[in-house]
Image (cartoon, rainbow, N blue to C red):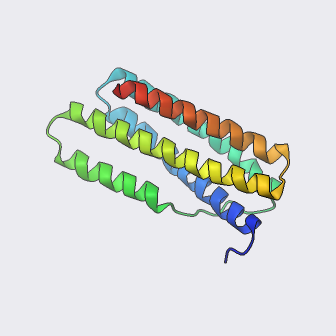
Amino acid sequence: MIETDRDLFVRELRELYHIERELEELQSGLAEAATDEELEEFFMAHSEATTEQIGRIEPLFDAIEAEPAPVKNPALEGLRTDREEIIDDLNDPVLGDIVETELGRGIERLEITKLETLLTLADRMNLPEEIVDPLETTKAEAENGLAEVRELTA
């Protein structure tokens, strides 16, 4: 039951952590599926960045004295399902690149939204910089990732 800012913060952090763990696996598959070299490079680089983000998020659980239990995100599941259904229907692999970039944009927006919520809660709770700074860094990376994937589709 979510009764306090802390309860919601822990839940949102768990959900973000689960999203990042799922993305770590997903991005290598997206890189392999890409027909465009720039898109392939984007997903490979983003996979490495995701691993770094996980390494940045994990210590936050110790800092707030919580366990990193997984909380599934229905939005991520919906994005993945939508992608899979469309990819299964495609005859032209190049069209798959457009679908993959759509997924990339959706994922970055999802991460940014989660991080904005966490930062709002961190501010309300007056959490220390050791918790806020990694979240801000991760949010900046997600915003940069969104800008990069937008450029690939321009």
Identify the residue at horizontal 65%, vertical 64% (top origin).
11
Compared with 67, 54 (above or below) is above
Which quadrant of the rendered structure holds the C terminus? Answer: top left
Identify the residue at horizontal 64%, vertical 44% (top origin).
54
User: Does any portion of residue 82 appear in the rendered image?
Assistant: yes
Q: What is the x, y in percent for residue 106?
A: 43, 45
Identify the residue at horizontal 55%, vertical 30% (top origin).
144
In the foreground, 153 or 17? 153
Q: What is the x, y in percent for residue 142?
A: 56, 37
Identify the residue at horizontal 72%, vertical 68% (top origin).
7
Which quadrant of the rendered structure holds the N terminus? Answer: bottom right
Q: Quadrant of residue 136?
A: top right
Compared with 7, 78 (above or below) is above
User: Does any portion of residue 48 appear in the rendered image?
Assistant: no
Q: What is the x, y in percent for residue 36?
A: 31, 24
Q: Residue furthest bottom?
A: 1
- Left or right: 108 with respect to 89? right
Q: What is the x, y in percent for residue 49?
A: 58, 34
